[in-house]
Amino acid sequence: MLFQTYGDRNHPAVLFFHAMGVTGASSEPVVKYLQDRYFCILPTSTVYCEGQKYVSKLDEIRQVEDFFCIWPSRACIGQRAAH
């Protein structure tokens, strides 16, 4: 999974999810209007990431959870989803 981020990490976060057939970059036109007030996070599913192999939906969820758990200067947000 690839995570693109825009804006200041100290602002409230907005997590975007893309539809099938497109990537996180498809949300960039909206992000242009939000990035001054929000920290925008645009993940791209492993299916569309060159050199990565899609494993499962649960693995995609884990990668999003891991992103938030290792997010600099932030504690792990909430509990991990039960798999």
Image (tube, rainbow, N blue to C red):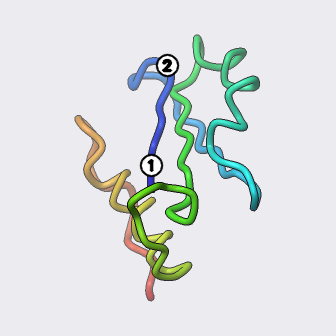
Comes first in the chain, label 2 or label 1: 1
Q: Where on the picture, by quarter, is residue 80?
A: bottom left
Residue that label 1 marks: 2
Secondary structure at badge 2 equals loop
Q: Residue at x 70, y 51 (%)?
A: 18
The vertical placement of 69 against 3, above or below, is below
Q: Is residue 15 left or right of residue 34?
A: left
Q: Where on the picture, by quarter, is residue 71?
A: top left
* Mark 2 crowdedness (10 Å alpha carbons): few <14, some 14-19, many ≥20: some
**Where does residue 38 sit, x and y in percent of width and height?**
57, 23
Residue that label 2 marks: 7
Mark 2: which amino acid?
Answer: Gly
**Where does residue 58 sit, x and y in percent of width and height?**
49, 80
The vertical placement of 42 against 21, above or below, is above
Q: Is residue 56 left or right of residue 80?
A: right
Q: Residue at x 39, y 25 (%)?
A: 9
Q: Residue at x 64, y 44 (%)?
A: 16
